[in-house]
Image (spheres, grey):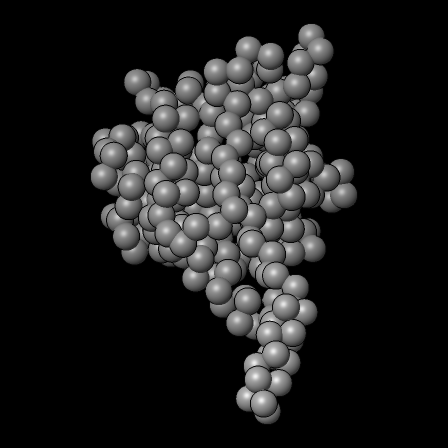
Amino acid sequence: MKQLSALLLLLVCIASVPPRKKTVIVWQPSHQTNTGKNFSEAAVCNAIADAAMATKPNFKEYKVWSLGRKDLHNADSGSNTMIAHTSAVVDGKLSGYAWELQQSNKRKPDVFIAIHNNGGTRRHAVWGYIHYGDAQEAANRELAAELIAAIASATTLENRGVLLDSTTGRNDYRCASTGKLSFYSLDEHVNTAPIRVLLEIGDNGASYDFLRDPVNQQKIGEAIKTATARWLEKREAMGL
């Protein structure tokens, strides 16, 4: 009888514990098709995102990608740092970036990962970018560092470290809070995800053949997902 009472008490306790919220991750592969001769950044980055999403463990994951949409402007081109390609409304149409961020915000993600390829660097490397002045800057830096280290370890890409989006010094999109040049996709006024990182993986010139190889795309995607899962597990263990 005592054993039955103890079992019933245990079941009641278990039932009273609220279910743990499943982590939501949003992937934003580049939609740019005009970067480099005979090179589609959109195709490369989408393949990397798909590989990441297919790699275990599985979270609640979504991809936001505007490629091919006719109801948007710059749905297959444009810079993440230009007002004309991001926050501007043209002929009543949102930009591809703006639409992607709207779709992301609807999912209420815990983590947002943008995937791009660099260009003009002459370096076969990987970079991580985070938003300047962000409330979660330390956590964003930590995740970005984990991701680029994992990619470099799994491939021949050089680890070039984590940089602030304000350091690129290009184009004209600025964060309303800091007034600094920034990446539209990482701006807290646009993207509601608490954790937001942008990866520049390889260079469309220096890494041309490497990036177009499906084997490398798969390796990169797997490395990103494994490192993300490890980082989330570590934060959970710390009660964060």
Vertical order, 124 against 120 (above or below): below
Quadrant assignment, res 10: bottom right
* Closer-to-camera residue (27/130): 27
Quadrant assignment, res 14: bottom right
Residue 184 at least partly seen: no
How many dots with numbers? 0
Vertical order, 155 against 230 (above or below): above
Quadrant assignment, res 107: top right
Percent coordinates x, y for residue 149 in the rendering: 38, 56
**In this view, which residue lies farthest toward the front?**
1
- Please tell me which residue is depicted at 65% across the width and 38% down the height of the picture: 105
**In this view, which residue lies farthest toward the right?**
177
Quarter of the image containing the C terminus? bottom right
- Please tell me which residue is depicted at 62% across the width and 25% down the height of the picture: 99
- Please tell me which residue is depicted at 76% across the width and 43% down the height of the picture: 177
Percent coordinates x, y for residue 202 in the rendering: 35, 39
Percent coordinates x, y for residue 30 in the rendering: 46, 30
Quarter of the image containing the N terminus? bottom right
Q: Is residue 157 left or right of residue 120?
A: left
- Please tell me which residue is depicted at 56% across the width and 54% down the height of the picture: 22
Residue 10 at least partly seen: yes
**In this view, which residue lies farthest toward the bottom?**
2
Q: Is residue 76 left or right of residue 222?
A: right
* Closer-to-camera residue (235/95): 235
Percent coordinates x, y for residue 79 in the rendering: 54, 26
